[in-house]
Amino acid sequence: MEAFDVSSRATRKCNQEFEAVKSQRCQLFTDCFEHVSVKIDHIYKRICRNNSAQAILSAENPRSRTWEAISYNCVAPGKDSCRWISVWRRKGFGCARSRFRHPQLSPAPFLILDEVDAALDNSNIGKVTSFVRDESRQNLQIIVISLKEEFFSKADALLGVTLM
């Protein structure tokens, strides 16, 4: 009976420690998410060169602590604020599984953008290239994969890859 009691106490202690780590991880994720949400709106306003532009990260179920899905939506400047454009939706951001990084929380030496310009017209490509140039002046190397001349013609260096 004594062995059972010792085992039960050890199990309870492990469960408490697990819940404490889980709670701390979810709190760190929540703090990061809130920080990134503010920064994304700021970055979108800078890219659009207009403070009426809006961008927001939102949780599918904000009351749930599992962050099952996250959406990124925006309103272009001069558009009806009720007309959100869904940019992306990401499933599987559970706190127990998440690894969410943001350059301003834990700076990285480089950033890779894969065809970020694919759905953009030339005017908006110009805005993004200006933003990339400004960011690259702040000790951040940016690698961009693009098929559009409007984008890659503004690069500091080009590397071409083709099938033979």
Image (cartoon, rainbow, N blue to C red):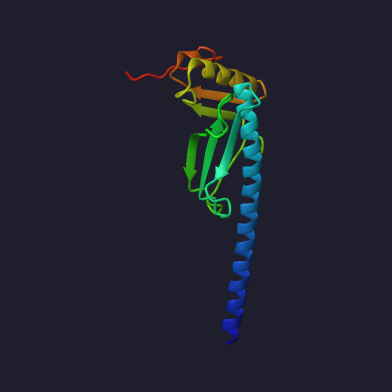
Q: Where is the N terminus found, in terms of image quarters? A: bottom right
- Tell me what residue is drawn at x 60 percent, y 86 percent: 2
- Tell me what residue is drawn at x 52 percent, y 41 percent: 71
Pick the front one: 18 or 71 = 71
* 69 to the left or right of 5: left
- Tell me what residue is drawn at x 56 percent, y 82 percent: 4
- The percent position of residue 37, horizontal first and vertical second, equals 62, 39
Q: Where is the C terminus found, in terms of image quarters? A: top left
- The percent position of residue 152, horizontal first and vertical second, equals 50, 15
Residue 94 vertical position relative to residue 5 in the rendered view, above or below: above
**From this viewpoint, is residue 152 visible?**
no
Count of numbered tags? 0
- The percent position of residue 14, horizontal first and vertical second, equals 60, 68
Pick the front one: 104 or 65 = 65
Residue 57 vertical position relative to residue 111 in the rendered view, above or below: below
Residue closest to the far left: 164
Pick the front one: 88 or 131 = 88
Residue 32 vertical position relative to residue 140 in the rendered view, above or below: below
- The percent position of residue 10, horizontal first and vertical second, equals 61, 74
- Tell me what residue is drawn at x 45 percent, y 17 percent: 148
**From this viewpoint, is residue 125 visible?**
yes
